[in-house]
Amino acid sequence: MSNSLGTLFRVTTFGESHGTCIGVLIDGCPAGVMIRPEDIQNEIEYRRAGKAPGSTARVEEDRVEILSGLYDGYTTGAPICLLVHNRDVDSRAYETTRRLPRPGHADFPGVVKYGGFGDLRGGGRFSGRVTVAYVMAGAVAERVLSHAHIELLAHTVEIAGVVAQAPADWSVVRRNAGANLVRCADPAAAEAMARAIERAAEERDSVGGVIEAVALNLPVGLGEPVCDTLEGELAKAYFAIPGVKGVEFGSGFTAARKRGSENNDAFIIQDGVVATATNNAGGALGGLSTGMPLLGRVAVKPTSSIARPQPTVDLETMESAMLEVRGRHDACIVPRAVPVVEAMTALVLCDFALRAGIIPRVLR
Amino acid sequence: MSNSLGTLFRVTTFGESHGTCIGVLIDGCPAGVMIRPEDIQNEIEYRRAGKAPGSTARVEEDRVEILSGLYDGYTTGAPICLLVHNRDVDSRAYETTRRLPRPGHADFPGVVKYGGFGDLRGGGRFSGRVTVAYVMAGAVAERVLSHAHIELLAHTVEIAGVVAQAPADWSVVRRNAGANLVRCADPAAAEAMARAIERAAEERDSVGGVIEAVALNLPVGLGEPVCDTLEGELAKAYFAIPGVKGVEFGSGFTAARKRGSENNDAFIIQDGVVATATNNAGGALGGLSTGMPLLGRVAVKPTSSIARPQPTVDLETMESAMLEVRGRHDACIVPRAVPVVEAMTALVLCDFALRAGIIPRVLR
Amino acid sequence: MSNSLGTLFRVTTFGESHGTCIGVLIDGCPAGVMIRPEDIQNEIEYRRAGKAPGSTARVEEDRVEILSGLYDGYTTGAPICLLVHNRDVDSRAYETTRRLPRPGHADFPGVVKYGGFGDLRGGGRFSGRVTVAYVMAGAVAERVLSHAHIELLAHTVEIAGVVAQAPADWSVVRRNAGANLVRCADPAAAEAMARAIERAAEERDSVGGVIEAVALNLPVGLGEPVCDTLEGELAKAYFAIPGVKGVEFGSGFTAARKRGSENNDAFIIQDGVVATATNNAGGALGGLSTGMPLLGRVAVKPTSSIARPQPTVDLETMESAMLEVRGRHDACIVPRAVPVVEAMTALVLCDFALRAGIIPRVLR
Amino acid sequence: MSNSLGTLFRVTTFGESHGTCIGVLIDGCPAGVMIRPEDIQNEIEYRRAGKAPGSTARVEEDRVEILSGLYDGYTTGAPICLLVHNRDVDSRAYETTRRLPRPGHADFPGVVKYGGFGDLRGGGRFSGRVTVAYVMAGAVAERVLSHAHIELLAHTVEIAGVVAQAPADWSVVRRNAGANLVRCADPAAAEAMARAIERAAEERDSVGGVIEAVALNLPVGLGEPVCDTLEGELAKAYFAIPGVKGVEFGSGFTAARKRGSENNDAFIIQDGVVATATNNAGGALGGLSTGMPLLGRVAVKPTSSIARPQPTVDLETMESAMLEVRGRHDACIVPRAVPVVEAMTALVLCDFALRAGIIPRVLR
């Protein structure tokens, strides 16, 4: 296993869905960053509340505990350990998982890779529950990035085929997305999405969607090409979120169908600085930020756990079997994944900002 | 800059488009792998020939030179340095690049990041030319993977909106794709693609497309979740290829519109081993290989260099300007990127195979 | 800050001397290793008890808490988080440290590097207290290494100029060293060492010494030259122990005065395998283990905290000042450092064993 | 194998003693550093000329070739590849090495680890010849460090038991050490050392010695504790030099025999900045530079290759055998290792300076 992201701002997560806790260790955070527990707690709450009619019955209190790395309210430069304890754990539903792998889940390759020693209760390390670790670390990263005036947001742009209208103004996206439980900045689409989730839940099924991540006020030149590109490191982080199956930037897959003359963004002078007239590049050229808004889009598959009988195999007898996943699950994980996508974006950009020397080792 | 991929099979590239050479250093290759220069040369040739009517006039001889790490035809466990010299270099066209950044290129963020010290001739480090390094290293990785019976291929599945039919059988894809210059396994589509490229070239424009990477005979459990996922490391490598704007696996972005009951792959027993009835997962669950074919898709934007006047800015006067990119360029880089995508897949899988302990440190 | 050791068996520590806890996160431990809490607890106890008349008055209960990575008594392949809470904390003595740096301590460079934001209570991250983290992780590493029959030990070979006789037989060293509080396998020397420490303590002074680390049953070829040598990675780990000022292997610094004809170890056949007649190499040639006992020696300086007035400077007024370090300190830290040196040896060898593929990813 | 040093200034070496070339790849060098080929060439010459009566008959022209990363005389931020070709190669003497391992050499563990596939001619990757790669990269690192006014030097302080007098003034050390072939700044000792080497050579034997590395004008706070300490990373780099068996800093092993009251360095104000009255710490406390001169000492064993019959074993028959090493060797490698120790110091400090943000990513 390899549970770390980042080169200079290095984040390692630990803990299992039904274990003692979910935690994260941040090594390399600059000293002098003021962190209030509520900065982290708010992000946890936002992730927890993101839901819709079909949401899991599991409710965690999730009070962040700060074990190290802060003194007198400021980061010290030492590793920061943050965790939330697991409390509302019901592992009965997972007794058969080791033998009857759930379709769409990591059970099967996990059992093979770890020789059956894995903690499979609630999905163990592979559970979406683990993403609360990124959200905690992301809150710290956002505080660091705020010193460089970099702002982050994420919002749902599609669920169950319902596509949100593109926002006219980034400044309202966070507020509008926060106003509904599907985290969509387009109120009409948000309602349709909620209904689609509800319908899927009633039919004991699930739906997926697409999340957009946006970073504003990026300096020009973040990224460490030719291998540690801005897009590549972000994609790696996004694919660490359970359920993600695709990542694109700017015009993304539609760029493949465009002509160069359409897709190229003309350089212009805007407010005295170099900008582009369009942003098909999604804020990245040659693996480097261009200074335009960074636009990433993340495709999330429909929740694999559905309350229907599904065909699987019995790994002991090597015969066909039927499985009805019980446990407690969201009919759509997209809303909860929104702050995770934002957090991942923050972690990667914070690392790049340190690598570029844009953020000093001590902040004041 | 950060020019390495991999943890145990670590590949670092060097060289510029119009510099002395393009090279690659492989550290961590097992000892005892028989490597013939022609194994590497053939892949270079395949990349070089991949083209269509609108191809660049630049022709490089590209004879691989093996500087270290082999003895008596076998790898020794020491670092392997491979390079090709640049010969057919015409840098006149790039004299203005530092001042007038080309739309869609890395010139602008590159000049800002490296303070104007970069070698911008022919795109320097950001040129597609640099990918020959991955192809050389990929040839070595494929030789290593062959010891574990892992097979790789890549093919063009879309160019300029022309979509190839899905191949019925993986075994014919490589041969069929190799039979035409656009590297598409569907002959009818290949012809339409070639025509579309030709048309774009005539109109001094360019087109993009989509490449599919496939890995066969993967053991179950490659990948190091929760952060170094199979998909995430592949995506990071793919985004290091100039022009890539999107990456997806299995049902990818279309999964976002599916129901869980459609998208989940039922487990079955096939030929005595666990398989899945469908492969929407694209061979990866929870960041681990499932044993089914790994299916990745890579969106490539239309070539940024087009022989038309384009609006840009003069970085010295900070005023608007027009730029006509001369140089020598492909109207579509997709065909040449096909072996690069295959090579990247090989590099990532070779690293994961070593990390999983599936390939020993000495091969015999 | 950078708080990790290891490439595949990666250990990261966190926590401050007077903070909430001292913890360690192990990422990359194979699955299937049986770990009983008492395996770890015993090593903590051994470290805690190692002392002599001049020992610190601070007493910590130090009950290990296992937060993640174990299931049903076995490692799962997931990250293992271990910690001990700090309880007996008295921070009054450290109020002036930020202003009046203690000679021989990290206070001065630490205050400069971290801009005064560091937690200096009890030495914070620079305290010897932090080494309990390595001891906990080392206990896990030793369990892993035992699967390859590798055995580790460490013992005091010199304190305050009192030199222990070389042990005739490695098998008795651990027991003999454990029988006294200075961790020396030579009973007569142990007594003299204890008296020397007592004398220093009475004189409000401190003494240093030398610790020897031994690894038995190493396979031939551990180490990843030419840069990650066996000796180099061990040295790096040893220098992470507060107070270490020198590291040598085999004949070490005395090799510099020998002739090649004396220092070379002749190869012989012993019990059917290749061995050497002498072991001036200390079990390592070319950065690789030779199969002979690995012999490392670590020089530990006298404790910097002494209960005498010492000249320092006032960082605020930039004037000379006198400082009397209060706090609670050992007059000799060598005995307590013995299990830390053993733990560090275990961590490095465990990483190399995984890198060499000698220990599989799943143990049974 | 693992052939890299450094985190941000990352150096990877390649090439074998009797292969095509010895090379080095530097990834992460800031842009804008003026590098003249002669800056590198001079260091190569200094290493080549360092010798004494007993020196190897091998003479290499060693003209540095710059393959990438420079444009118009300045670094571009892209990877820098430097190499020297091997020309004067006589491999006849090494035909038996694979079967009859040379005492004191890496042959035996190397053959075991790499399954007999290694290139053993002239020691292959384990040869001292490989260190020319560090010297080339070190020349670049010194140019980078000069932007921060950091100065480096190394000199021989002991050979064959002859100990040099401590220099009164660092400013004369480099010139004085360069004035003789043993690289010792004390002229009288230098002569005695030369005679001792000559004597050993006449007796077909070899001698070792100790090299001191010094870094001046270090800023306070270089180093990334608690694991990547200044001393630990230097030690790791020094142990990568063939023949090194011990490393110490400041009072080093003698600190183990001192009292705390003697060994602690009192803080004082000197020229308006904080300094220490003595420098037993060798310029490092808590893994961080103190601003005082960094003092490291490296113990080098006597050359293993001696022109005498030595007992070994025949790995094929597993019987005792006698071996007379022919080849061409120095009776003392200390003089040639002096610039290598200096280069290693430069590489580690350059990496730490970048990690600390003391040197920007673009130098002007």
Image (cartoon, coloured by chain):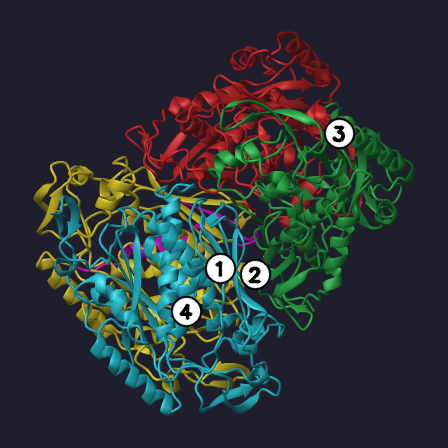
Chain colours: A green, B red, C cyan, D yellow
Q: Chain of mark 3?
A: A
Mark 4 or mark 2, which is nearer to you? 4
Which label's residue is closer to the chain start, 1 or 2?
A: 1
Task: Indicate which label's residue lies in the foreground, 1 or 4.
Answer: 4
- Mark 2 falls on what kind of element? loop
Chain where mark 1 sits: D
Q: Which mark is residue D359?
A: 2
Gap in angstroms between the C-alphas marked 3 and 2? 56 Å
The amino acid sitting under disc 3 is Asp
Residue identified by numbered label 3:
A205
Magenta part of the chain: D24-53
Marks 3 & 2, CB-CB < 8 Å contact: no
Q: Which mark is residue A98?
A: none
Q: How many marks?
A: 4
Mark 4 burial class by Cα count in 10 Å: few <14, some 14-19, many 20+: some
> In this image, A73 relative to A107: left or right?
right
Q: Are marks 3 and 1 in contact (CB under 8 Å)?
A: no
Between marks 1 and 2, how big is the CA–CA gap? 8 Å
Image coords of residue C218 (percent x, y): 28, 50
Q: Quadrant of the C terminus of chain B?
A: top left
Same chain for the residues under marks 4 and 3 in the image: no
Q: Which residue position is annotated with label 1?
A: D350
Residue designated by label 4: C45
Q: For numbered disc 3, what is the local secondary structure?
A: loop
